[in-house]
Image (cartoon, grey):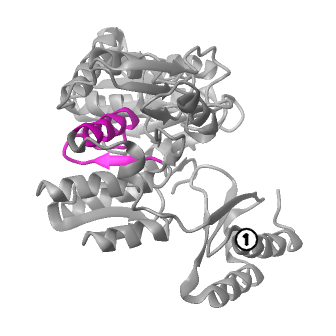
Amino acid sequence: MGKYFGTDGFRGEANKDLTFEHAVQIGRFLGWYYGAKQGKKAKILIGKDTRRSSYMFEYALCTGLMASGADAYIMHVTTTPSVAYITRVDDFDCGIMISASHNPYYDNGIKLLNGRGEKMDESTILEVEDYIDGKVEIPVAARDAIGRTVDYVAGRNRYIGHLISMSKYSFKDVKVGLDVANGAAWQIASAVFDALGAKTYVMNNTPDGYNINTDCGSTHIEHLQKFVVDNGLDVGFAFDGDADRCLCVDEKGNVVTGDHILYIYGLYMKERGKLLNNMVVTTVMSNFGLYKALDKVGIDYEKTKVGDKYVYENMVKYGHRIGGEQSGHIIFSKYETTGDGILTSLKMMEVMLARKKPMSELAAPVVFYPQVLKNVRVKSKPDAQNDPDVQAAVKKVADELGDEGRILVRESGTEPVIRVMVEAGSDEVCEKYVDSVIDVITAKGHLA
């Protein structure tokens, strides 16, 4: 990770940590880097979520891009995976998504994608940061070299068509609940499901700039659980603010996590001879229950660091077809380069319809170990993580759990937070061990 950019872009409170000046600078650098530096006019795509500050950052980025001679193509409110897809298929030099994903409305972020729709490489990110820090000077464009903005809502429509084409089945008479989190999917998700014939029930689809992720979406899935049961729906899908993740709710109101999704679709691919390398890519945060279920059906798995970036890198390196995170970032590498919540929901519908089974039955083989995860806001993530007493507390827990559980302590890639997670035989044991580590972090004065 760089000074400003974490595992998922430059993120922080709008105009406090991430300012409009930063956005202008990022636009200035990218417009020059992909344009004048290479003796051409850069063509750069921009999308945003529904946060009020996203409009400010959109215009700031456009200002910087145009001042460096690039043309900025604006998709307006759209999802992160749509920007990745259109960047790739419409031959843009790079893509920019303005979103802080599942964070509250007052945060925002700038995610950079290369011309293949993949997360930007570290070397380019470091050059962007050098420009922000004043270590590099670049010229401004003049006269006819100054760039322009182009309305590119057609790209969003093309993406919707792409999603519709992904379905092998009609959704006729299937009752589907969608929690679009007052975010980027608020128009796209229902348009896709309606076009495929579903009886669509949508909630949290009135964004006002301040209610994105507020008590809704994949981070507050309890509301979709009640919604599915109260309305007698067949299945429900919850997205986050930029719709790159999806969690499901079965017809009984139970949560179907990213781990369940990896099992359900991994097995479906294996049954059809489509699971290349017989491999599902997970992160270290996946539950023991997933691995036990995969073992039973003879599917192999890899474990990467937390972050869909690392999952995707592993998939590309070894040619694997499906991977993701428990949080609902699922990557289908045959179709897209990033997690796509709406595509994930379509793939889950495909399995339900192909196997003629309800979601509850498909997910049943994955029996989760109890897991407790607590976030601790700290002054310095490295200081807290590397404190000898904290490390000793973690080792003590690991030794006591043995083969009956595990502990994972890691730094958040996007927030000033240390995450402490324990899996064990009961919630009480998990709580005890998580709190024992947090007590040491607290006693050593690391809390922010």
Determine which quarter of the picture holds residue 112: top left
Q: Position of residue 330 (x, y in %)?
A: 37, 48
Give above or below for 366 relative to 340. Answer: below
Is residue 140 at all visible to an observer of this figure?
Answer: no
- State the residue at coordinates (33%, 62%): 281
The single residue placed furthest to the left in the displayed view is 273
Give the image quarter of residue 204: top right
- Count every numbered label the image shows and give the total: 1
* Disc 1 crowd, CA 10 A, few/some/many (<14, 14-19, 20+): many
Residue at coordinates 61% horizontally, 63% vertically from top-left?
Answer: 411
Instruction: Give the image location of residue 390, x and y in percent.
Output: 74, 79
Q: Which residue is mark 1?
A: 434
Q: Residue at x 32, y 35 (%)?
A: 343
- Classify residue 375 by image quadrant: bottom right
Query: Which range is magenta?
Result: 328-353
Q: Quadrant of the C terminus?
A: bottom right
Query: What's under tag 1, amino acid-wise?
Result: Val
Up the image or down, 304 lies above or below 63; here it is below
Q: Nearer the viewer, residue 354 or 284?
A: 354
Give the image location of residue 179, x and y in percent.
52, 27
Residue 220 x %, y %: 63, 38
